[in-house]
């Protein structure tokens, strides 16, 4: 049985906990500016997470997250199948196959769509070039750029819930 005092104390604290929700979303964007990786898992039609997850390079522009990926990757195929919701975790926790620590990181359910505008591609690639200059961008940057031109890669935009 819950004591009346405990119930009243919990009710008094509830607004404070509810007010933290927007701060958590703000923390996602702060972390996105600092982190080198995000982890993505598309949601299946029943809302469960896909078994396919990935740690991946990304760019954060205007409260959207962008990735460049092969078109046959599940995160890209899911969009084509109408599965446009994905959970995105922010932070660097190593390879997802070696640990599920990333699942404790700040996360947000986002809406995925293909980003096809060439000016968006350029802005994202410029952001990535700066962010990953010391992490192999000299090797991967041209692959991303050429892949976006010849269809060997697609760009996905992850937008926060509206």
Image: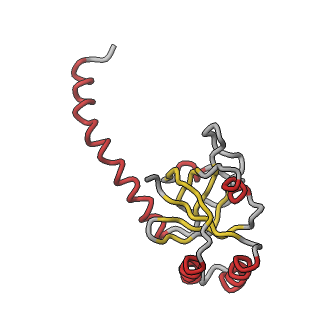
What residue is drawn where x is 29% and y is 46%?
A: 19
Residue 100 showing in the rendered view: yes
Q: Position of residue 63 (x, y in %)?
A: 45, 65
Q: Is residue 118 left or right of residue 50?
A: left
Q: How is the image coloured?
A: secondary structure
Q: Position of residue 130 (x, y in %)?
A: 54, 83
Corner quadrant of residue 137: bottom right
Residue 98 showing in the rendered view: no
Corner quadrant of residue 66: bottom right
Q: Is residue 5 left or right of residue 73?
A: left
Q: Nearer the viewer, residue 3 or 108?
A: 108
Q: Position of residue 31 (x, y in %)?
A: 46, 64
What residue is drawn where x is 26% and y is 24%?
A: 6
What residue is drawn where x is 62% and y is 64%?
A: 114
Q: Position of residue 67 (x, y in %)?
A: 62, 68
Q: Above or below — where is 148 with respect to 109? A: below
């Amino acid at each position: 049985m819950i004591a009346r005092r405990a119930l009243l104390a919990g009710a008094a604290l509830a607004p404070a906990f509810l007010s933290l929700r927007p701060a958590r979303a703000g923390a996602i964007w702060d972390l996105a500016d600092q982190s080198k990786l995000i982890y993505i898992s598309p949601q299946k039609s029943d809302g469960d997470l896909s078994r396919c997850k990935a740690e991946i390079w990304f760019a954060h522009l205007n409260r959207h997250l962008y990735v460049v990926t092969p078109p046959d990757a599940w995160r890209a195929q899911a969009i084509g199948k109408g599965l446009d919701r994905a959970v995105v975790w922010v932070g660097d926790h190593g390879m997802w196959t070696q640990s599920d620590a990333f699942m404790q990181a700040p996360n947000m359910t986002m809406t995925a769509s293909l980003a096809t505008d060439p000016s968006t591609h350029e802005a994202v690639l410029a952001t990535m070039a700066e962010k990953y200059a010391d992490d192999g961008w000299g090797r991967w940057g041209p692959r991303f750029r050429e892949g976006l031109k010849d269809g060997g890669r697609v760009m996905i935009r992850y937008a926060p819930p509206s």
